[in-house]
Amino acid sequence: KAGVTQTPRYLIKTRGQQVTLSCSPISGHRSVSWYQQTPGQGLQFLFEYFSETQRNKGNFPGRFSGRQFSNSRSEMNVSTLELGDSALYLCASSLGAVNQPQHFGDGTRLSIL
Amino acid sequence: GNSVTQMEGPVTLSEEAFLTINCTYTATGYPSLFWYVQYPGEGLQLLLKATKADDKGSNKGFEATYRKETTSFHLEKGSVQVSDSAVYFCALKHQGSSNYKLTFGKGTLLTVNP
């Protein structure tokens, strides 16, 4: 069974640009969550989607947005990039129930110059 | 709100040593508890989980028991290997609510020397 696939693996952008990251969940999983990982703040929750609806949102500015498609694939977008947005962005999928574990992809490493 | 506290690292052990990584949590109700492991350059892998008090999660020689009375979920392994070198994260997910996010501890870097 294929795992969670995130593309691209690496991205380099400059301040002020925007970026879109993609996540394909495990087949049959309808929930997709996004996390930001940085050395200083650790793992922080961005948002979670289930059946194309955002169910939860973390404490990030509106420059961070996401969506989910009918095939459960998800994208997140960051606009007006700042240096502090440099991070590893992790996507996780699950069946959707609250006691189900989340399975993570290998992440997209975003570097802002 | 929910929070997870892990022992500060880094932890350095010799091969075949006993491992304990402490994890305590703060949460209302009855959260599900998880341990994840992250190898260099990779995402997080689920190591084990427990969904109710006194449950013991186990996988690949690692174990952790959900202790509600002490709000703890300590990770243990009887004999570590060099290949266990990684960062370990304790996490919780709050049951009984519409909050589906994982709350993570800050991670503990484990280095096992031959």
Image (cartoon, coloured by chain):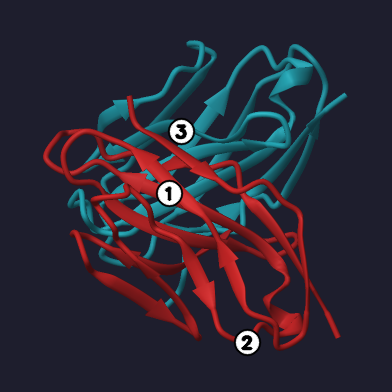
Q: Which mark is residue B91?
A: 1
Q: Residue B96 appears at what percent x and percent y? A: 11, 40
Same subunit, tags 1 and 3: no
Q: Nearer the viewer, mark 2 or mark 1?
A: 2
Q: Which mark is residue A45?
A: 3
Q: Amino acid at mark 1?
A: Ala
Q: Residue A20 appears at what percent x and percent y? A: 59, 33
Kindly indicate which chain is depicted in red in the rendered structure: B
Q: Amino acid at mark 2?
A: Ser
Q: Nearer the viewer, mark 3 or mark 2?
A: 2
Quadrant in the rendering for residue B111: bottom right
Quadrant in the rendering for residue A86: top right
Tell me the crowding category of disc 2: few under 14, some 14 to 19, or many 20 or more residues within 10 angstroms, Cα based.
Answer: some
Classify mark 2: helix, strand or loop. loop
Same subunit, tags 2 and 1: yes
Q: Is residue B12 above or below residue B94?
A: below
Same subunit, tags 3 and 2: no
In the shown orientation, is residue B43 left or right of residue B48?
A: right
The extreme front residue here reads B69
Q: Residue B37 appears at what percent x and percent y? A: 57, 63
Q: Please report, as a chain letter, where disc 3 is located.
A: A
Quadrant in the rendering for residue B86: bottom right
The residues bearing labels 1 and 3 have C-alpha atoms spaced at a distance of: 12 Å
Q: Please report, as a chain letter, where disc 2 is located.
A: B
Q: Who's the residue at 62% across and 51% down the image? A: A107
Q: Who's the residue at 72% across and 51% down the image? A: B9
Reading the image, the residue beneath label 2 is B79
Q: Who's the residue at 39% across and 58% down the image? A: B73
